[in-house]
């Protein structure tokens, strides 16, 4: 048994999806918590402090590399699994599908939801991360005013709508992904499974809702 | 329950062999009793076809009492038809109404190629069992049944998994054609018992490797398998298999 054999089997590939999925869930907690500082409604003072810490301290910048690696691994492994699974299903499709009687639609649409989230992420990085890092240079240089950038970006209704759609996709992706990741990691004790399922649904509603409320708050002028 | 007769339209998948392309064909059966089983209704249809000199529809069946796992048939969008926790042979015609059109398809999976009409090749499951779904015992006198203490809860959980009849409905229902519910039942029922302990690690690794070689997909925990399993095997056995795999993968030499 080599490590390669372990992580390239059908179960091993899912383990990679589960590991990276949980890692990305942890990232979401940090991201949403820091961004929630905008609701201090102090003209972005608290938020800017938090963003400055994340952007100009060595440790978060090193962790950032791990974050990108996690994203890339999750995306590539996900695409490979989707290809494998379609091949396993074969060319001839059923005339009548089991559909929603057997499973929830979003559990069968993780690839589609993931693709929407990826497209959203490209736009999101282009809006904030890229201009900020470009301004900083390669290392820990001067940051841009991210609060002002948010305010300006979210004054456009279309961008706000795209962000909200991205958050809805994230919510459904998490509604299945959260508990599925733990199942894949081998959580089979009934008490833990029901706990993970409940926390997963709560997480998939609360976190994307908080994210979606950020552009909405700026657009509707709830925060100045 | 009131008895009634019905006339039905059947849309059945016909395919000569694995090398030819198949298609649906419409048939009509009349005066079908609500007391008949689904397979008996197919027997009636096949008698009709033989009488007019047509090739009868090939389908798998054996015990016709819901325990052998031979019957298949994907009926109206669900393996084994509309009833819950039920095999095709135990599906009775009272599940349908007069004038219904019933669509009957074979299991669809690359690892289960169609042999003819509704018959698919499920020997992939046999090869997965051969890869590790057993325990090695020396021959000789049978061991005294009470010599090996087993926790009642574990014995029950093991028995629940051992209910699997290997029909392949889980694969047929899964959007990824994954055999994980079958595999997890077979791995778990031995992993839960002391007799399964000596080969515990090699069993799960070898059986997963064989499953991959056969071309089944990965599990995405959608739950379609559990919803269609005639023996109502729980999807939590898949999580148990994952933990067996993780443990074996991390600790085996």
Image (cartoon, coloured by chain):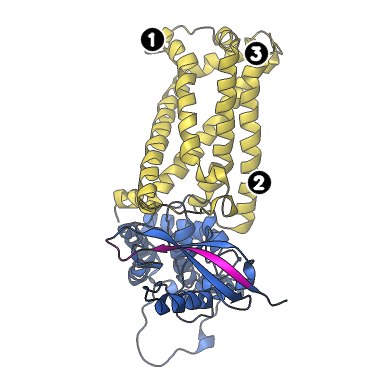
A143 and B62: which is toward the camera: B62
* Left/right of residue B54 with respect to residue A54 in the rendered view: left
Label 2: element kind: helix
- The chain that hosts pointer 2 is A
The disc, 2 or 3, on the residue closer to the chain's N-terminal end is 2
- The chain that hosts pointer 1 is A
Please give the residue where the numbered disc 3 appears in the rendered image: A218
**Image: magenta residue range:** B6-19
Label 1: element kind: loop
The lab-note entry on whether marks 1 and 3 share a chain reads yes
- The chain drawn blue is chain what? B
- The chain drawn yellow is chain what? A
Q: Is there a contact, CB below 8 Å, between mark 1 and mark 3? A: no
Tell me residue A215's x, y (percent): 62, 18
Which mark is in front, 1 or 2? 2
Q: How many marks?
A: 3
How far is disc 1 from disc 3 in space, using C-alphas?
A: 28 Å
Please give the residue where the numbered disc 1 appears in the rendered image: A137
């Amino acid at each position: 048994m080599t490590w390669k054999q372990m992580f390239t089997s059908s179960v091993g590939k899912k383990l990679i999806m589960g590991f990276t999925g949980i890692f990305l869930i942890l990232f979401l907690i940090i991201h949403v918590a820091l961004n929630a500082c905008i609701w201090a409604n102090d003209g972005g003072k608290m938020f800017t402090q938090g963003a400055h810490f994340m952007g100009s301290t060595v440790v978060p910048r090193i962790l950032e590399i791990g974050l990108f690696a996690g994203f890339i691994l999750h995306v590539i492994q996900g695409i490979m699994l989707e290809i494998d699974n379609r091949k396993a299903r074969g060319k001839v499709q059923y005339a009548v599908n089991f559909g929603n009687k057997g499973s929830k639609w979003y559990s069968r649409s993780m690839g589609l939801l993931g693709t929407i989230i990826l497209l959203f992420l490209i736009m999101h990085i282009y809006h904030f991360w890229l201009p900020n890092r470009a301004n900083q240079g390669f290392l820990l240089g001067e940051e841009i005013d991210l609060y002002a950038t948010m305010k300006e970006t979210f004054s456009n209704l279309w961008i706000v709508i795209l962000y909200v759609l991205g958050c809805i996709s994230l919510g459904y992706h998490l509604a299945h992904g959260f508990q599925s990741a733990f199942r894949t990691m081998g959580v089979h004790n009934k008490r833990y499974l029901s706990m993970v399922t409940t926390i997963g649904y709560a997480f998939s509603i609360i976190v994307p809702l908080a994210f979606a409320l950020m552009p909405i708050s700026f657009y509707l002028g709830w925060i100045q | 329950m009131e008895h009634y007769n019905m006339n039905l339209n059947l849309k059945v998948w016909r395919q000569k062999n694995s090398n030819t392309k198949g298609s649906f064909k419409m048939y009509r059966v009349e005066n079908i009793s609500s007391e008949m089983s689904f397979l008996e209704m197919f027997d009636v249809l096949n008698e009709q076809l033989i009488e007019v000199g047509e090739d009868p529809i090939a389908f798998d069946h054996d015990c016709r009492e819901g325990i052998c796992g031979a019957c298949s048939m994907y009926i109206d969008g669900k393996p084994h038809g509309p009833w819950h926790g039920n095999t095709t042979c135990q599906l009775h015609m009272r599940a349908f109404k007069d004038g219904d059109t019933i669509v009957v398809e074979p299991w669809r999976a690359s690892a289960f190629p169609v042999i003819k009409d509704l018959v698919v090749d499920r020997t992939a499951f046999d090869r997965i069992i051969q890869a590790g779904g057993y325990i090695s015992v020396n021959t000789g006198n049978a061991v005294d049944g009470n010599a090996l203490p087993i926790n009642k809860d574990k014995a029950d959980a093991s028995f629940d998994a051992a209910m699997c009849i290997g029909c392949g409905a889980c694969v047929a229902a899964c959007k990824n054609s994954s055999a994980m519910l079958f595999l997890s039942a077979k791995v778990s029922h031995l992993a839960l018992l002391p007799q399964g302990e000596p080969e515990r690690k090699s069993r799960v690794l070898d059986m997963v490797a064989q499953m991959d070689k056969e071309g089944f997909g990965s599990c995405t925990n959608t739950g379609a398998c559990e919803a269609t399993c005639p023996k109502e095997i729980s999807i939590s056995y898949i999580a148990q298999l994952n933990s067996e795999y993780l443990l074996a993968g991390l600790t085996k030499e």
